[in-house]
Image (spheres, coloured by chain):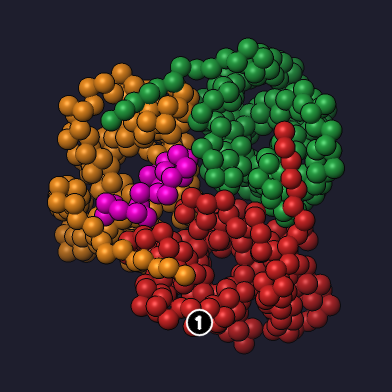
Chain colours: A red, B orange, C green
Amino acid sequence: MTFDLYTILYIIAIIAEAMTAALLAGKLEMDLVGVFLLGWVTALGGGSIRDVLLNHYPLSWVRHPSYSLITGFAALATIVVARHMHKLRKLFLFLDAIGLVVFTVIGCQIAIVGHLSLICVVISGMITGCMGGVLRDILCNDVPLLFRSELYGTVSVSTAIVFLLCSHYIDNKNIELIIAMIFGITFRLLSIRYNWTLPRFTYRS
Amino acid sequence: MTFDLYTILYIIAIIAEAMTAALLAGKLEMDLVGVFLLGWVTALGGGSIRDVLLNHYPLSWVRHPSYSLITGFAALATIVVARHMHKLRKLFLFLDAIGLVVFTVIGCQIAIVGHLSLICVVISGMITGCMGGVLRDILCNDVPLLFRSELYGTVSVSTAIVFLLCSHYIDNKNIELIIAMIFGITFRLLSIRYNWTLPRFTYRS
Amino acid sequence: MTFDLYTILYIIAIIAEAMTAALLAGKLEMDLVGVFLLGWVTALGGGSIRDVLLNHYPLSWVRHPSYSLITGFAALATIVVARHMHKLRKLFLFLDAIGLVVFTVIGCQIAIVGHLSLICVVISGMITGCMGGVLRDILCNDVPLLFRSELYGTVSVSTAIVFLLCSHYIDNKNIELIIAMIFGITFRLLSIRYNWTLPRFTYRS
C-alpha cells in the first residue's frame, strides 16, 4: 500500500516533469529527439544523480525500463496537447508542484533507508527534487531557475524538513507522505500566487 | 579477434572525437590546456557517464591509462593539422560518423553483457554515442547539438536498434558490428549530404 | 598528524571555494538558496565527481555531514563580509590558490592509495582541483574559466606532478604536502601577478 501510493505519485511526477521539459523544448524549437531526450533527462536525471552520489544501484530506470517509455511518451504527447496548454496552465503548475514535492520526499526516504545523517537526508531530497530541473536548464543553456528564483529550492528544503519531522514522530509511511505533500504543494502554490521571493545577494566587485 | 576489431575501432573513435573537439576549442580560442581537456572530455566523457550510471567500474580510462594519452595527443596534434583541415573536411565527417556509430555499438554491447533490458541497451548505446558531444557543447556554453539538429540522436538510436536485431539473429560479433557500422555510417553521411532533419516542435506560451 | 594537516587544509580549501562561489553568485544577483547551493557545489563538487568516477564511496560530504554545513555557512557569511571584500582581495586570491592546490594534492593522494596508474593520479588531482570551478561556471552559464585562461589547469597539473615526484622520493606525508603546496601556490600567485598565459589555439573553419 505504501509502495503503491509512492509509485503512483512517482509516475505522476515523472510525467509532469517530462511534460514541462517538453514545453521548454518547444520554446527552443527542438526536434523530436530533442523533446524526447530533454523530457527523459528532466524526469529521471535528478534521481539518477542522487543514486550515483549515494551509490544506490541499479538506477530506477535500469530496474524499471517502463519509466523510460513513460517519460518518452509523456514528452511526445505534450506536442499534441500543447495547443490546449494555456487552458491547462493551472493543472500544469499543480502537477509540477507534485513533481517537486514527491521527488523530494522520495529522495529523503531513500537516504533514511540508507541510514544517512539528517543533513544528508535533506540534501538527498533536494538533489532528487531539484536536479532534474537544473540539468534541463543547463542543457537549454540557461542559468538554472533553481539559482535564480521561484523558491524552488526553498520549497524542496522545507518539504524535506517537514517530512523528516513527520517520519520521526509518525509511524505510518502514507500519512507522513501526505502531510509533507500537502505542506509542500501549498507552499509552492502560495509562493507562485503571491510572488514570494527570497532576498537576493547583490555584489559588485 | 572480436576484441581486436572493437579496440581498433574504439581507438579510431576516441581520436576522431578528440580532434573534432579540439577544432571547436580552436574556434573558441581556448589555450593548450583547454584544447587538451575538451578533447579528453569529449572522447571519454560519454563512456564515463554510461559506466557511472550502469555501475560498470573501473572506467575505461582508469583501466587503460593510454587512452588518456591518445586523446590528449590527438587533441594537440589537431593544432598542427588544423591549417590543412579544409582539405580534410570529408575525412573528418567520416571519422566523426565512425565515432558516433562505434561508441553507440560499444555502449549497447556493454549493456547486453550486463543483461539489461532492451530499452536500457538502446539508452546505453545513445549515452555512449552522444553524451561526449553533449558535455563538449555544455562546456562550450552552447545548447547541445544533439538537441537541435543533424539527426545525431536519431542515427545513434537506429544504429542501436539495428545492432540489437543483429545480435539477436547473428552469432558472430564482428559481423554484427560491421552491419551496424555500415548502416549507421551510411545513415549519418546521407543525413549530412541531403540535410535530413526531423520535424521540430515549436511552442509559444 | 598527517590526517590533521590534510583535514585542516581541506577545510580551509572548501571555505575558500564556497566564498569565491558566493561572490560570483552575488554578481549574478542570486537569492539566498542560490548562494548556498552554488557554494556547496563549487566546494564539494570536484571531489564528488572524482569519487564517483573512481568508485570511491561514500562521498566525503556523506561521511562528514559537517562539511555541508561548513560550506553553507561560509557561502552565507560571504554576504556579510562582501562589503569589505575589496580590502580582502589579496587574502582571497591566496585562499583560492590554497583551495586549488590542496584539492589537487588530495585528489592525487586518493588515487595513489587506490593504486591507480601515474596518469590517473594526475587526472584525479586535476578533477579534484578544477571540477568544482567548472561546475560553478556551468551553473552560471559561462564557458568554464579552466578552458579559457589563468593557468588554472596548468597549475593543477604541475602541482600533481610535483606531488607525485615528492611522494616517490620522500617518505613523509606532511613534507610531500608542504613542498607541493609551496610550489603550487607560488606558481599560481606568480601567474596572476605577471599575467602568465598559455598560447592559444585559434581556428577559423
Residue C30 counted in the magenta span = no
Residue at position x 45%, y 39% in the image: B140
Amino acid on which the number 1 mark rests in the picture: Leu
| Horizontal and vertical percent position of residue A163 | 75, 73
| Horizontal and vertical percent position of residue A25 | 42, 62
| Horizontal and vertical percent position of residue B29 | 42, 27
Kindly tell me whether residue B82 is visible in this rendering. Answer: yes
| In the image: residue B35, left or right of residue C41 | left
Quadrant of the rendering where the C terminus of chain A is positioned: top right
Kindly tell me whether residue A62 is visible in this rendering. Answer: no
Residue B133 counted in the magenta span = yes
> Label 1: how many residues lie within 10 Å, few (<14), some (14-19) or many (20+)?
few
| Horizontal and vertical percent position of residue C108 | 61, 29
Q: Up-down: is C136 above or below A152?
A: above
Q: Up-down: is A190 above or below C183?
A: below
Q: Nearer the viewer, residue B23 or B6?
A: B23
Q: Nearer the viewer, residue B137 or A168?
A: B137
Q: Which residues are magenta?
A: B131-152
The quadrant holding residue C156 is top right
Q: Nearer the viewer, residue B65 or B48?
A: B48
Residue at position x 36%, y 60% in the image: A30
Residue identifier under label 1: A88
Tag count: 1
Q: Nearer the viewer, residue A57 or A25?
A: A25
Q: Up-down: is B156 above or below B48?
A: below
Q: Chain of mark 1?
A: A
Q: Main secondary structure of the magenta part?
A: helix
The quadrant holding residue C189 is top right
Residue at position x 26%, y 55% in the image: B151
